[in-house]
Image: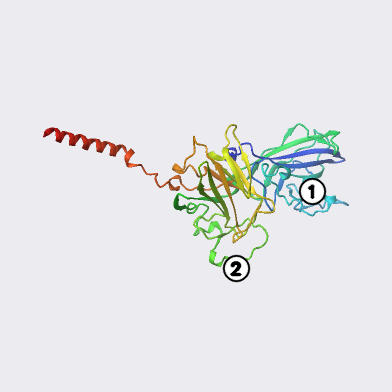
């Protein structure tokens, strides 16, 4: 059941893989390099970062760590002299912060647990640390893999499978001329479910167009209702200026009062129609006073993404989860320009325009074709308006000249008139 809930149609193979490589043995255990690979195309791990936990099968302890730390030491009273870093049966490990001294770092560590999405930046979609384990066994047959692995990134939503023994990882020297391999390698795979992560949606979509003055808002109560205490505190926009920003992200939302009560709204506006092109404006608005979204991204599905010509002020990458179908695009901000979506307020929005080239065989403004099929923000599916509320073309109603009823009525009266004339 969990596997079904974790399936994502736009990223069917996306997962987080934890690789546990034993690289050397010690007198009472081993030294391992643990690497977290985020193979999800558009779902990243944002601040305050990942937390990795597990249960030891035997009486293992953590003697030392490089590039990460356990959140608690636990009861190490039975040890004399040098104390272990952590003696807990169920340790929880977090990444170190930027600025950590170099002698406490290894490669791909110390970013505060923030890990990019694979499609957005593969170089920072990896996080690593080194761990020295004692009282664990000193051979491939006596050592045991950790069990009940948990991953918070940074909240719930991930379910991790059991450790599996795989082919030992191979490592290259700095000059790429020598190759070594791990003594033993375990893989643990974690998959994400939006249903497990959050009880309510986190974003919604509104629509508008140049050919219809109607603005279709986010559906009412898309992410909760104002009179529902479970949705958290709601702040009237009139007094929003007195809200003091904490400067740190808080996963308990403090939302601006809206009809939809979503932290994020994505607005899709069909802006202009040219002879061979058409233009769309996309605006993303943050209604959460407790969250700055760094490394944000948006995924949109539309059949004309196979012929997108130009984007302004957003990065773009096509996603093709199924061969031969290019209808999905990932958009994200430009570094140091708009890659952070600020908290609710005057600066809490980012926007861009997209220029599409028309494909004559399928292009139309009729029946809502110009609007996206689905939209994701930071990996979560957004609530779309119902299709019957989409903006319609002014001439979308049936024309009288082509109505079968009118044609039949005209024919009837014509026959009736001819019959009357024949009677004279």
Numbered disc total = 2
* Rendering coords of residue 91 (x, y %): 74, 48
Say few, some or many: other residues with alpha carbon within 10 Å of mark 1 (under 14 / 14 to 19 / 20 or more): many
Q: In front: 158, or 419?
A: 419
Q: Is residue 117 left or right of residue 64?
A: left
**Most distant residue in the left direction:** 424
Residue that carries the numbered disc 1 in the rendered image? 67
What residue is shown with label 2?
Answer: 242
- Relative placement, left or right, of 26 versus 56 is right
Say above or below: 137 vs 46. above
Name the image quarter holding the N terminus. Answer: top right
Q: Is residue 222 visible?
A: yes
Callout 1–callout 2 Cβ contact below 8 Å: no
Which element type, helix, strand or loop, lies under badge 1?
loop
Q: Give the residue at x 70% y 44%.
A: 121
Is residue 144 or residue 255 the one in the foreground? 255
Label 2 secondary element:
helix
Quarter of image, res 17:
top right
Depth check, front residue: 96 or 373: 373
Q: Name the N-terminal-most of marks 1 and 2.
A: 1
Within 10 Å of disc 2 (Cα), the crowding (few <14, some 14-19, many 20+) is few
Q: Position of residue 14 (x, y in %)?
A: 64, 39
Q: Residue at x 78, y 33 (%)?
A: 168
In this rendering, does residue 156 appear at all? no
């Amino acid at each position: 059941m969990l596997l079904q809930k974790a399936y994502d149609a736009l990223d069917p193979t996306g997962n987080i893989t934890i690789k546990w490589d034993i690289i050397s043995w010690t007198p009472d255990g081993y030294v391992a390099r643990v690497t977290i690979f985020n193979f999800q195309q558009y779902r990243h791990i944002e601040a305050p970062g990942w937390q990795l936990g597990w249960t030891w099968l035997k009486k293992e302890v953590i003697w030392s760590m490089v590039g990460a730390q356990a959140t608690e030491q636990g009861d190490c009273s039975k040890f004399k002299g040098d104390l272990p870093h952590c003696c807990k049966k169920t340790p929880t490990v977090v990444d170190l912060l930027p600025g950590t001294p170099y002698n406490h770092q290894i490669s791909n560590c110390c970013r505060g647990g923030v890990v990019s999405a694979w499609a957005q930046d593969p170089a920072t979609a990896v996080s690593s640390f080194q761990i020295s384990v004692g009282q664990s066994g000193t051979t491939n047959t006596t050592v045991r893999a950790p069990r009940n692995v948990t991953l918070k990134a940074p909240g719930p939503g991930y379910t991790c499978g059991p450790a599996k023994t795989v082919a030992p990882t191979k490592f290259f020297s700095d000059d790429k001329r020598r190759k070594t391999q791990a003594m033993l390698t375990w893989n643990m795979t974690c998959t994400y479910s939006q249903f497990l992560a959050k009880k309510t949606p986190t974003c919604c979509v509104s629509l508008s167009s140049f050919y219809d003055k109607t603005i279709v808002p986010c559906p009412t109560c898309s992410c909760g209702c104002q009179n529902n205490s479970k949705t958290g505190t709601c702040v009237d926009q009139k007094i929003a200026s007195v809200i003091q920003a904490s400067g740190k992200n808080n996963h308990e939302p403090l939302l601006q009062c809206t009809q939809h009560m979503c932290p994020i709204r994505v607005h899709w506006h069909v802006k202009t129609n040219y002879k061979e092109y058409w233009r769309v404006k996309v605006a993303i608005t943050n209604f959460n006073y407790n969250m700055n979204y760094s490394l944000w991204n948006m995924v949109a599905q539309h059949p004309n993404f196979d012929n997108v010509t130009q984007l302004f002020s957003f990065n773009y990458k096509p996603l093709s989860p199924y061969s031969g179908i290019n209808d999905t695009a990932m958009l994200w901000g430009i570094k140091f320009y708009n890659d952070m979506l600020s908290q609710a307020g005057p600066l809490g929005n980012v926007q861009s325009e997209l220029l599409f080239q028309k494909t004559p065989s399928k292009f139309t403004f009729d029946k809502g074709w110009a609007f996206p099929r689905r939209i994701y923000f930071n990996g979560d599916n957004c609530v779309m308006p119902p299709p019957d509320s989409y903006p319609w073309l002014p001439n979308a109603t049936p024309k009288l000249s082509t109505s079968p009823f009118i044609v039949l009525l005209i024919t009837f009266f014509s026959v009736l008139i001819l019959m009357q004339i024949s009677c004279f």
